[in-house]
Amino acid sequence: MKGPILTATDIRVSFRKENQRRLFGRERQQVLRGISLALEEGECLGIIGESGSGKSTLGRVLCGLLKPEAGTVRINGLDIYGRHNHRENAQLHHSLSVVFQDYTSSANPRFRVRHIIGESLRVLERIVGSKLDRERRTAEVLEQVGLPSSFAARYPHELSGGQLQRVCIARALAIRPRIILLDEAISSLDASTQVQIMDLLLELRRSLGLSYLFITHDLTSITYLCDRVAFMNNGEIVERVDDIRHIAEIRHPYARLLLESVMGIGVEYGSGDNAQAQWAAAAAC
Ligand SMILES: Nc1ncnc2c1ncn2[C@@H]1O[C@H](COP(=O)(O)OP(=O)(O)OP(=O)(O)O)[C@@H](O)[C@H]1O
Ligand SMILES: [Mg+2]
């Protein structure tokens, strides 16, 4: 059996506390307190937690944007914060893409779609040191996310929220990553568009063999999309469910609270196909 595609070991991050009495105060807020996780090839791992629990900070560490004070992140065995030769560097940059929540600000309003998608291709060209057929690749990824290639000429304001988030997913796909990290990527969309985007993600996973790290505060979307879930609270993983079908068995008080709050609004709990059918039905209402 293959090893995990991504591992994080004992990740620790703290930030300097603001509003300290002394100008050069040294008090620090511990935001990640020794997080370890592994992402297997082709799986979707959900990371859930309340606001401020450290999810996005963890996401930034996992995608190479924030070097942790302690701990390691490895993709295919390569330490992403280590020193690498040119080939390894290119390999790492090919490995992981990110889709954020705020699709309106993550897509420059002055750029056409072809330019927005071309941005990540340009970065990749610099890293691998060779030219890519940007026009063809842009048309290809637009098709993969269910948009006509004519959308390449549109500006962000000429797209709906769902279409723009599809463009952001297309941008993430453009570099042919193995892993996509989605940080609250569907949270600002209405329920039926959320279902469409989650269906798209499931389809892309099937057709391209992608692995997802899916960060959210919404348990219902986790049961729709994910195979496993880790619950974060105050910078720690407080509970893990290694088979999403056993989600109802969670014990940690915080995880139970989340579960009950979802059940409380009348969602019958299921998982996999069952949860997907329930979501689709709810969204159609
Ligand atoms: N660059 C930074 N400097 C100082 N503090 C930070 C920084 N980034 C995050 N924090 C703090 O770290 C904590 C965790 O923030 P983070 O954005 O990771 O939470 P989150 O779980 O993603 O929350 P949300 O669900 O609201 O997006 C918060 O208290 C936040 O204020
Ligand atoms: Mg966040």
Image (cartoon, grey):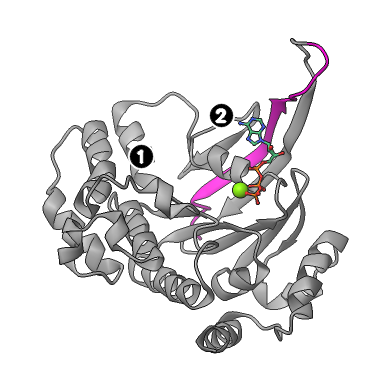
Q: Is mark 1 within 8 Å of ligand 1?
A: no
Left or right: where 213 falls relative to 205 = right
Q: Secondary structure at mark 1?
A: helix
Is the residue 264 above or below the residue 253 in the image?
below
What's the amino acid at mark 2? Lys
Which residues are drawn in magenta? 1-22
Quadrant of the rendered image containing residue 208: bottom left
Earlier along the polypeptide chain: callout 1 or callout 2? 2
User: How far apart in space, not on screen, are marks 1 and 2 (Cα)?
Assistant: 16 Å
* Residue identifier under label 2: 67
Left or right: where 180 falls relative to 61 = left
* Residue identifier under label 1: 93
Residue at 22 percent of width and 39 percent of height: 122
Residue 51 percent location from the top left of the image: 70, 51
Residue 263 percent location from the top left of the image: 76, 79
Visible residue check, residue 254:
yes
Visible residue check, residue 96:
no
Residue at 46 percent of width and 59 percent of height: 211
